[in-house]
Amino acid sequence: MQPVKIAEGVYDVGVNDWNSRNFHGYSINMGTSYNAYLVIDEKIALIDTVKKEFAAQLIENISKIIDPKKIDYIISNHTEMDHSGGLPRILHKIGENKPLFCSKMGLKNLSMHFPQNWNYQAVEDGEELSLGEKILTFIEAKMLHWPDSMFTYLKKEKILFSSDAFGQHYAGYEKFDDIIGDAIMPHAKKYFANILLLYSPLILKIIERIASLGLEINIICPDHGIIWRKDPSKIIEAYIRWSKQETKNKAVIIYDTMWHSTEIMAEAIASGINSAGVEVRPMHLRKCHRSDVMTEVVDSRAVIVGSPTLNNGLFPTVSDLLTYMKGLKPKDKIGAAFGSYGWSGESVKLINKELEAMKFEIIDPGLKIQYVPDKEGLEMCFQFGKKIGTAIIG
Ligand code: FEO
């Protein structure tokens, strides 16, 4: 990728990772990018680096603009290795004594990843660093999404370097929102659903805090995906909506099936939900990745989970999904369980226990059908769905 000019003296020198398809358990179908930003004035700063494997490309990109040895400062907004993995190589290139600015937690975390004797400089929230006419301000963004996370704000240009926040796993030459348009929003939503959802209350506080500081934002430069320059408020408003966990009249039915009986139940339940005028999306867990399921969960009012009973327990994919979903802390959902069984039939009870642990409103004890649903069973599924649909409409 060629460096991308963002403003006078500000460039994205990051890289595209076209063929990555899994990001610590989250499926990414369009690869990703590791963005790193060069800010040039009397002094030159590099904000974040890239994954270790792409460090040579980062140096090559920087070299197209300046001699990398001219970099005076490195700023690490976040320790995770997709942004810090390139530090050893870049510091080796520019000189290991160059100051490396990070948050206080960043100092702790970076030192644990890189115990080298680097010139770490921990900054306070609100501290400024002058590059000449360009002034950088550091803003604490704890738990968005690591304890060390911070933002860096370029004052005059009103550019927010937002680390992982407002990012998307997307590799492409279309580096700006005005070029890609709304096609980027599903990627931004999936990123939020799978990485940030559990920090929703903190995200709202950080957004409120930035507003209270009176920081105007013309451009948001995240560490993944496209840069928001046409309408940064669009992604900020989406984050507020997703963090508030606002939902639509929509249900997602998440299930696995052994001999298709639970699948037949899922489809009859979907018809019942839809008969109440509610959007519904059945998702088979061996055909839909858990990260795609979570993306649908974010704006669904109801989450219906189905599993056959296997060895007195849940189907393994359903257990996996419930564990994953519980960790991401979706809120204020209607929940219900269903499943086919042979002789013991524990699955509904076990699903309900997990949905209760997530504080979902369980609106029905659940529906279980032995072996294969007959005509009467299918009607029960339809009515079960209709009851859920009616509850969603309220
Ligand atoms: Fe993109 Fe939390 O690292």
Image (tube, rainbow, N blue to C red):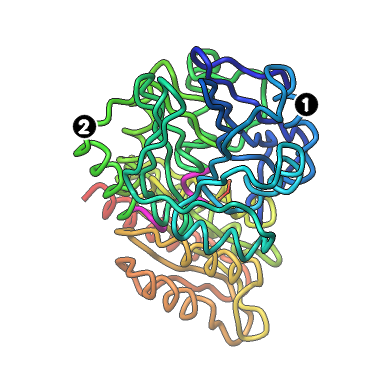
* Residue 34 higher or lower than 87, as above or below: above
Total numbered labels placed on residues in the image = 2
Q: How far, Cα to Cα, is label 2 from label 1?
A: 37 Å
Residue 214's mark?
2
Residues rendered magenta in the picture? 191-200
Identify the residue at image location x=53%, y=83%. Answer: 346
Q: Is residue 240 left or right of residue 351?
A: left
Quarter of the image holding residue 219?
Answer: top left
Above/below status of 153 relative to 228: below
- State the image coordinates of residue 64 (x, y, percent, origin top left): 73, 17
Q: Secondary structure at mark 2?
A: loop
Name the spot of residue 236 as percent of width and height, x first.
Answer: 34, 33
State whether residue 251 is above or below residue 109. Answer: above
Q: Which mark is residue 60?
A: 1
Name which residue type carries label 1. Glu
Q: Does the CB distance between marks 2 and 1 fall below 8 Å?
A: no
Respond yes or no on whether mark 1 lies under 8 Å from ligand 1.
no
**Residue 21 image position (x, y, % from top left):** 73, 43
N-terminal label among 2 and 1: 1
| Depth order, front residue of 239/385 | 239
Q: Is residue 199 magenta?
A: yes
Quadrant of the frame with the N terminus: top right
Q: Quadrant of residue 361?
A: bottom left
Describe residue 4's horizontal placement relative to residue 139 as left or right: right
Q: Is residue 386 magenta?
A: no
